[in-house]
C-alpha cells in the first residue's frame, strides 16, 4: 500500500523533473512544468472517467485494466461488490427457506405491525382465517377478526394464555390464537386449529358427567339398603361395624359423585354465570348457622359482615363455592381453633374470605391446590370425607363470575382463602334480610 503511494509520488516527481529539464534546455521553464502537470492531470482524469464508467455499467462491462494506485482501487471495489453479491444471495436464499418452511407449518403465522396492521401471513393463516393476499395485507387485524374477545385480547398486555374462538362463519371450528410480542412493538399472531382437542375435551366432560349420573342410581339403592340394615334391631351385632364402614364409604362416594356432577355442570355451562342479585350477607348468615349446627367443628365460627352489598351472579354457584371453603376450614381446623368468615367491598370489587387457625398448607402444595383430586394429605382428606374436588369447584365458580381465588397459608398456623369479585359483579343496592 505504502509502496504504491511512494511509486505514485515518484512518478509525479519524475514528470515534474522531466518538465524542468526540458524547460532548462528549450525554455521557458514554467511552460514545460505546466505541460508536465497537465499530462499528469490528464492521466488522472482519464482513469477517473474509466472508473466512473465501469461503476455505472458494472453489470455489463469488465473492470478496466489499470496499474498502480488505480488498479488497487478497482480491485477493492471488485472485492466489495463480490462480498455484497454473496450476502445478497445468502439473504435471498434464507428468505426463500423461511417462506417455504412457514408455508409448510401446520400453524398459521401472521406478522402484525405496531399499529396491528397485517404485514405478512403464511398460507395456513390465510386458510384458517379466510385471509386473502394481497387485498388483506395492510388491513388492521381487528377489522378482519371481529370477535369481541379477540379485540379485548389484542388490546390487553396479557398474551401468555391463548384465546380460543370460532373463526368467522365457521361455528364448528375452534381456533387458538396467541400473540407473541417482538421487536419494536410488533406482534406475531399464531393461529392453531384446536377443533380436535376441543371435541376430545367435550367428550371427556360428557363421559365424566354421564358416568357420574349412571353411578348415582345404583349407589342410592345400596345406600338405602345399608340405612335399613343399620336400623334393623334384629341384626347380629357382628355386622354393625362393617355396615357402619360401608355406610360411610357409600356417603363418601355420594359426595364424590355430587362434586363431579357439580364440576361438569360448571364446565359445560356458558363461560359467564347468570346475573341475578344474590343476597350475600343473608347467604353467609345461613352458612354460619349451618356450621354452628355441626357436631364436630372448631369452637368458634365468626362472621364479619362489613358490607351489605350483594353480587350479580348465580346463587347456587356462589353458595357452592362459599360452602366448600367454609367446610374445608371446619374440616382442617382442630376443635380448639377458630374459623372467621369476612365479607367486604371497596372501589375495586367485593371480597369473601375464610380464615382458619388450622393445620395450614406447606408452600410446595400451593400451586396445585385447585387441581381436581389434588390433596395435600390424602389420608386425612379421605378420613374427613373429602372428594379432592372442592377447590376445583370454587375456582370454576369464581371464574364464571369474573373472580379469582387467593390462598395465603402458613403451615401449622392456619390458612386464609379469599374470593375476589370484580366491581362489575357488585350490587350495591342494600338487600333486605
Ligand atoms: P378435599 O375434598 O380433599 O378437601 P379440596 O379440593 O377442597 O379437597 O381441597 C384440596 C386440598 O387442599 C385438601 O385435600 C387439603 O389438603 C387442602 N386444604 C383445603 N382447604 C384447607 C384448609 N382450610 N386448611 C388446610 N388444608 C386445606
Image (cartoon, helix red, strand yellow):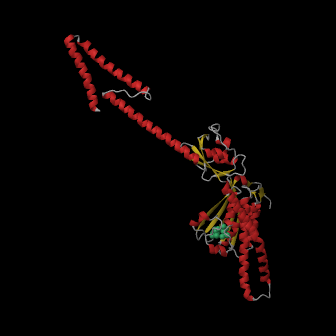
For the point 37% across and 26% down, which residue is it? 64
Rendered-image quadrant of the N terminus: top left
Q: Choose top left, top right, bottom left or bottom right for residue 288.
A: bottom right
For the point 44% across and 26% down, which residue is it? 57
**Vertical side of 125 occupied by 382: above or below:** below
Residue 293 placement, left or right of 132: right
Residue 240 placement, left or right of 55: right
Q: Choose top left, top right, bottom left or bottom right for residue 432.
A: bottom right
Number of numbered callouts drawn: 0
**Vertical side of 308 occupied by 17: above or below:** above
Is any atom of residue 351 visible in this view? Answer: no
Where's residue 344, x and y in %? 69, 59
Q: Nearer the viewer, residue 398 or 428?
A: 398
Where's residue 311, x and y in %? 74, 57
For the point 78% across and 83% down, which residue is it? 229
Report the image quarter containing ligand 1. Answer: bottom right
Rendered-image quadrant of the C terminus: bottom right
Residue 375 placement, left or right of 27: right
Q: Nearer the viewer, residue 182 or 57?
A: 57
Q: Nearer the viewer, residue 358 or 38?
A: 38
Where's residue 342, x and y in %? 69, 63
Where's residue 20, x and y in %? 22, 16
For the point 72% across and 73% down, which residue is it? 253
Is any atom of residue 25 visible in this view? Answer: yes
Residue 428 placement, left or right of 31: right
Amino acid at each position: 500500500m505504502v509502496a504504491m503511494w511512494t511509486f505514485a509520488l515518484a512518478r509525479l516527481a519524475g514528470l515534474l523533473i522531466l518538465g524542468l529539464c526540458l524547460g532548462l534546455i528549450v525554455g521557458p521553464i514554467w511552460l514545460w512544468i505546466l505541460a508536465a502537470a497537465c499530462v499528469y492531470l490528464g492521466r488522472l482524469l482519464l482513469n477517473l472517467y474509466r472508473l466512473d464508467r465501469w461503476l455505472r455499467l458494472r453489470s455489463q462491462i469488465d473492470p478496466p485494466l489499470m496499474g498502480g494506485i488505480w488498479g488497487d482501487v478497482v480491485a477493492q471495489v471488485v472485492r466489495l461488490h463480490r462480498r455484497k453479491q454473496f450476502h445478497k444471495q445468502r439473504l435471498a436464499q434464507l428468505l426463500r427457506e423461511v417462506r417455504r418452511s412457514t408455508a409448510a407449518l401446520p400453524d398459521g403465522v401472521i406478522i402484525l405491525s405496531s399499529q396491528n396492521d397485517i404485514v405478512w401471513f403464511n398460507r395456513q393463516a390465510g386458510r384458517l382465517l379466510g385471509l386473502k393476499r394481497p387485498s388483506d395485507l395492510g388491513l388492521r387485524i381487528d377489522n378482519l377478526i371481529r370477535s369481541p374477545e379477540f379485540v379485548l385480547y389484542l388490546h390487553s398486555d396479557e398474551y401468555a394464555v391463548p384465546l380460543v374462538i370460532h373463526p368467522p362463519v365457521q361455528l364448528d371450528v375452534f381456533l387458538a390464537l396467541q400473540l407473541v410480542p417482538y421487536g419494536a412493538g410488533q406482534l406475531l399472531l399464531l393461529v392453531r386449529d384446536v377443533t380436535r382437542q376441543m371435541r376430545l375435551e367435550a367428550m371427556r366432560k360428557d363421559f365424566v358427567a354421564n358416568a357420574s349420573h349412571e353411578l348415582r342410581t345404583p349407589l342410592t339403592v345400596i345406600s338405602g339398603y345399608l340405612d335399613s340394615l343399620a336400623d334393623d334391631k334384629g341384626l347380629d351385632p357382628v355386622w354393625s361395624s362393617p355396615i357402619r364402614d360401608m355406610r360411610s364409604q357409600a356417603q363418601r362416594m355420594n359426595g364424590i359423585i355430587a362434586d363431579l356432577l357439580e364440576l361438569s355442570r360448571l364446565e359445560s355451562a356458558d363461560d359467564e354465570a347468570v346475573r341475578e342479585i344474590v343476597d350475600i350477607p343473608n347467604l353467609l348468615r345461613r352458612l354460619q348457622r349451618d356450621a354452628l349446627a355441626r357436631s364436630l367443628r372448631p369452637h368458634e365460627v365468626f362472621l364479619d359482615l362489613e358490607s351489605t352489598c350483594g353480587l350479580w351472579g348465580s346463587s347456587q354457584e356462589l353458595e357452592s363455592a362459599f360452602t366448600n371453603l367454609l367446610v374445608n376450614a371446619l374440616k382442617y381446623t382442630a376443635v380448639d381453633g377458630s374459623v372467621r368468615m369476612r365479607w367486604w367491598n371497596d372501589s375495586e370489587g367485593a371480597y369473601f374470605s375464610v380464615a382458619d387457625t388450622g393445620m395450614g398448607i406447606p408452600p410446595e402444595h400451593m400451586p396445585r391446590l385447585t387441581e381436581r383430586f389434588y390433596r395435600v394429605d390424602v389420608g386425612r382428606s379421605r378420613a374427613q370425607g373429602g372428594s379432592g374436588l372442592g377447590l376445583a369447584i370454587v375456582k370454576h365458580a369464581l371464574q364464571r363470575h369474573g373472580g379469582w381465588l387467593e390462598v395465603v397459608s402458613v403451615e401449622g398456623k392456619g390458612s386464609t382463602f379469599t374470593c375476589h369479585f370484580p366491581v362489575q359483579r357488585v350490587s350495591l343496592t342494600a338487600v333486605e334480610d
